[in-house]
Amino acid sequence: MAIASGFDRDRDALPIRTRARVLNAKLKVGESIEHVLGESRLAYLVPSTGTVEVNGVRIHTRDGAAIKDVDIAAIRAIEDADAVMVDLGQLNEGGRAINIPGGALTIQNLIRLD
């Protein structure tokens, strides 16, 4: 579900002035969703609670995953999870890539504030 977006078709989302969107998903164990990105876009995903897999790569609570070079980001809940994804659009490459089928996934640990 888009909670903020620069796209007209996301009518219920808070409007922002950029070609990006902020999405939120609440998933129960075993549930999955797919987000169509397109190979020229970059997204950043952070589970605020729970653990998810993104295209087979495990992402834990408050870890971040920069997703690039994939048409579809397939997200599956390993635990009950609440995840936020920012679909950023086209950005420069950076970070350390982990090879996954169909693209690259960069994993970065975020600073934990607790």
Image (cartoon, rainbow, N blue to C red):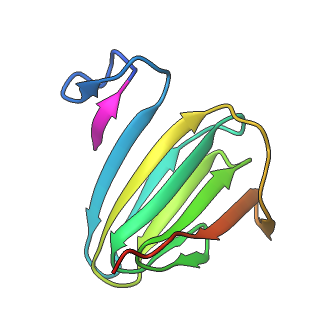
The extreme front residue here reads 113
Residue plotted at (79% across, 45% down): 93
Residue 16 image offset from top left, x and y in percent: 35, 22
* Observer-nearest of 112 and 21: 112
Q: Residue at x 39, y 20 (%)?
A: 7
The image shows residue 24 at horizontal and vertical percentages of: 30, 52
Question: Which of 89/110 is in front?
Answer: 110
Residue 1 image position (x, y, % from top left):
28, 44
Q: Quadrant of residue 46?
A: bottom left
Q: Is residue 25 left or right of residue 95?
A: left
Q: Is residue 87 magenta?
A: no
Q: Which residues are magenta?
A: 1-5
**Relative to 13, does residue 67 appear above or below in the rendering?**
below
| Residue drawn 47% across the image and 20% down it | 18
**Please, is residue 99 above or below residue 103 in the view?**
below
In this rendering, position of residue 79 left or right of residue 74: left
